[in-house]
């Protein structure tokens, strides 16, 4: 979707619109049709959420921000009921000291691959 204006709609207005659309559809559909349409809409949502979840994992790995605060290592040094974000960041830096270096090496590999691809294109 190129047009992102839909994401600027007031959340209450968006929710109300979806609710009203559902109410309007009830009158024109029998129970089996309502169920089929409802399941289809849920599948669309699940597809978006599944894609979004995996995309977020990949993007965070590329950025070098993907970590597991539920790992055994982290829990062995800090496992509160409520996390203090600053303390968590400090412990993550200690636990994953080379975290940003992984991103730098990945960036270098991408740049090297880009140069190789450019060379192949020039020689073709």
Image (spheres, rainbow, N blue to C red):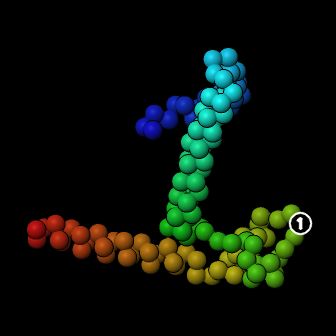
Which residue is more in the foreground, 12 or 31?
A: 31
Residue at image position (57%, 35%) is: 7
The residue wearing badge 1 is 81
On-image quarter of the N terminus? top left
Residue at image position (63%, 22%) is: 29
Q: Is residue 31 above or below residue 123?
A: above
Is 89 on the left-hand or right-hand side of 102? right
Residue at image position (64%, 80%) is: 96
Q: Position of residue 51 (x, y in %)?
A: 53, 54
Q: Position of residue 8 (x, y in %)?
A: 58, 32
Disc 1 on helix, strand or loop? loop
- Give the quarter of the image for residue 25: top right
Q: Is residue 90 visible?
A: no
Q: Is residue 99 visible?
A: yes
- Give the quarter of the image for residue 113: bottom left
Which residue is more in the foreground, 64 or 26?
A: 26
């Amino acid at each position: 979707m190129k047009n992102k204006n839909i994401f600027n709609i007031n959340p209450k207005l968006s929710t109300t619109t979806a609710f009203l659309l559902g109410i309007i559809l009830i009158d024109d559909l029998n129970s089996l049709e309502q169920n089929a349409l409802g399941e289809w809409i849920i599948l669309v949502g699940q597809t978006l959420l599944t894609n979004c979840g995996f995309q977020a994992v990949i993007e965070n790995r590329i950025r070098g921000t993907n970590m597991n605060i539920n790992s055994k290592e982290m829990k062995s040094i800090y496992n509160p009921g409520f996390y203090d974000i600053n303390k968590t960041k400090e412990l993550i830096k200690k636990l994953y000291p080379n975290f940003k270096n992984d991103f730098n090496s990945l960036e270098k590999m991408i740049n090297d691959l880009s140069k190789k691809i450019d060379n192949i294109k020039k020689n073709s």
